Image: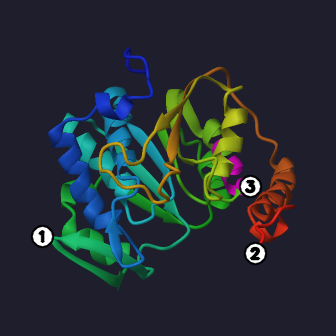
Amino acid sequence: MSLNTTPIAADLLHRIRNPERVQRIEQIGLLTGLRFQDGTYKKPNFERGLILDWLVETRKPAQILELGTGRGLGAFAMSAAAETYGVTASILTLDYLASDFPQTWAIEREGKREVLTASRAEIWPKHLPESWRTRISERCGPTTKLLNKLLREGRKFDLIFIDAGHDLCSVVSDLAHGMKLLAPGGCILMDDFAPAASFGISTCIAYTHARRFFEIAEVIPSEGLVYGDQEIPGMPRNMVLLAKRKSEVSLRPWTLAFWKIAGKFVELAYRPDLFPARRSA
């Protein structure tokens, strides 16, 4: 499996934009990715669905692994793309929360907006096509345990989407294990590359290491360029695409103790009360 011959560029979202794809992802997003903040409805990061759609179309992955199910935007974007482009794909999605765990869910149906308490097990069968759902299987638990189990099972994946825990240790661990689980010719997509936001710095740090393992390590703008909204205005998120792994990798799990400690200091670095300057009255 080779990467699309068209070079990956900063204007990717504009190049892959077409009305059918944009509408398909928006409809999925309104059911699974809509966020409710300060009394307003927004569409932050729906663009990640467009990129996942494009990856399924161009790479035609048979085995897909998603880390971080959330409400299902990523999994259903990939499943819908598989149906649209005639790709035989199986999607395994991992999440810390069980499918029947109730969440605060902002949703839009037929122009009506509401916030309700519901679980994936309630929302998915009611609003999303069965043909999309049948491609998706779920496992519940921390990725640290689930990924090790997948390694013991000998699993390999053609496309891995990383969007689970955002602390530094989790992101680094997910990337390292993802590289080990990656099939020859496969690719990894990481969400939340955002240097100016606490939730995005971990992916930035992980990216500096990923560049040593992949020939292609592209940062792709992925928020606000198509659907218009940004979760944090002025600080848009990006995604990282990793492809053409240079060699097989081995894991050193004992180093994660360092990353857990380092992550705590990174979190502290974002606290305004610890900054050496302060605003005068």
Q: Is residue 245 above or below residue 39?
A: above
Q: Which residue is mark 1?
A: 110
Q: Which residue is mark 3?
A: 169
Q: Tell me which numbered mark, 2 or 1, is placed earlier along the sequence.
A: 1
Specify the segment rendered in magenta. 168-175
The residue sitting at 80% across, 48% down in the picture is 253
Q: Nearer the viewer, mark 2 or mark 1?
A: 2
Q: Tell me which numbered mark, 1 or 3, is placed earlier along the sequence.
A: 1
Q: Which residue is mark 2?
A: 281
- Quadrant housing the C terminus: bottom right
- Overall secondary structure of the magenta section: helix
- Give how far across and how far down residue 87 sits, in percent: 27, 35
* Distance from the alpha carbon under mark 1 to that under mark 3: 41 Å
User: Residue 129, located in which quarter of the rendered image?
Assistant: bottom left
Q: Tell me the crowding category of disc 3: few under 14, some 14 to 19, or many 20 or more residues within 10 angstroms, Cα based.
A: many
Amino acid on which disc 3 is placed? Cys
Secondary structure at numbered mark 2: loop
Residue 66, disc: none
Secondary structure at numbered mark 3: helix
